[in-house]
Image: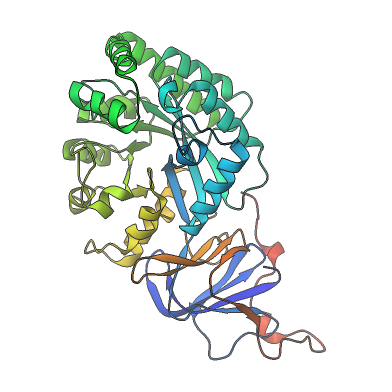
Amino acid sequence: MSGITEIRHARVVTPTTVIEDGHVVITGNRIAAVGPTPGRELPRTTTIDAEGRTLMPGLIDLHGDDIEGHREPRAGAEIPLPTALTAADRANLCNGVTTKFHAVAFEDAPDDGRSIEAATALATELDDEEYTLGDNRLHARCELTAGSVDAVEDLSETAAIDLLSVMHHAPGTGQYDAESFERHYIEDRNWPADSVAAAARSRASMAEADREARITRLADLADRLDCPLASHDDESPAEVDRMADHGATISEYPLTLDAIQRAADRDLTTVMGAPNLLRGGSLWDNLSVVDAIDAGCVDVLCADYHPPSLLAAPFVDTGEPLPTRVNRVTRNPAEVVGLSDRGRIAVGARADLVVVEPEPTPTVELVVVDGTEVLNVGLGGRGAEGSEPTAGPNPSLAAYPSPSAFDSSR
């Protein structure tokens, strides 16, 4: 998009209300006007008629590991990183995700494609690439092993880490007892049984002092990088307190109602998986998103392993207003990671926008990233009647700021 673009006749979702027949005007890469659709199309403007569809901010996904399926679509079938990242970028855009935090696991798990070396390579590619259409960022998920912590510290010297989370996947902690740990790694991640047994022994034997020291190192790193720190799979209020005391501001996937309520009490932003909401429950019989919403404790939803669920989530009827549901996948995640320029439809905000057809299942018709149209499925833009320049200034456009009026920094 160049110049001025108007999206008309949309159901515009702002942070606090819904404009049933609304329009949004884009100047350069910023939103210049929001309000009811005017009676006449703006002259000298590219016009897109949303035809009553829902216009939302671009989705912001704080935790999505779907890149792994693009990187290795079958066990042992490794795809080159540029191809995998391009495919993941396009798939996310098709589901309305304009800002993606790829959850890259720094974990010694070579039997299912996860390794420190593979994670470092992907993180480096994310830092270097200039070919994706969305805003792709790194969420470094660090298992509490010595090698993983060393690798994340080393990576921070050469690549940007946009979000850092602390993981400790071991039998008897978090979401896994001994049986579910074995089942997850053998059935879901195709590990050989002897590798699962070795990992179980190694992780279960970690001394408490070592665990605490590694959390401290990661917390100090996040502080030095001015990077948000997240806990992961907290099972109890005590585990929430441990990470909050280390400076965590995000609690990902709390496993119990007690844990998520404690996270809310400690002012941690709570993040849960959109597939949990869409499916009606946890894959591992942990806390249901519906129950957590009923308790007033869910701030953010993330794609986890399935971006289409993130797009569908705001359209699941939870008994809350639509702006509240949309904020969970747009404004709220933007705020917790310090992206104050996006995640809302408001004058001056970065123009990351998606037009969604909610029925029969939510699908994306138009995606705008940083003011640029990157996807359009059936919503043709056109120049408004009378769009040819006339002598002198056009008073109907005088109210809209020029692109230079906005700070276009990230």
Q: Is residue 392 left or right of residue 123?
A: right
Q: Is residue 2 left or right of residue 278?
A: right
Q: Position of residue 367 (x, y in %)?
A: 54, 63
Residue nearer the viewer, 369 or 107? 107
Residue nearer the viewer, 388 or 74? 74
Q: Is residue 318 left or right of residue 75?
A: left
Q: Position of residue 112 (x, y in %)?
A: 41, 27
Whether residue 167 appears in this view of the structure is: yes
Q: Position of residue 148 (x, y in %)?
A: 46, 19
Q: Which image quarter holds the N terminus? A: bottom right
Whether residue 339 appears in this view of the structure is: no
Please tell me whether residue 184 is drawn above or below residue 373 in the rendered image.
above
Please tell me whether residue 106 is drawn above or below residue 50 in the rendered image.
above
Residue nearer the viewer, 75 or 21? 75
Q: Is residue 32 left or right of residue 22?
A: right
Q: Position of residue 257 (x, y in %)?
A: 17, 40
Q: Residue at x 62, y 23 (%)?
A: 157
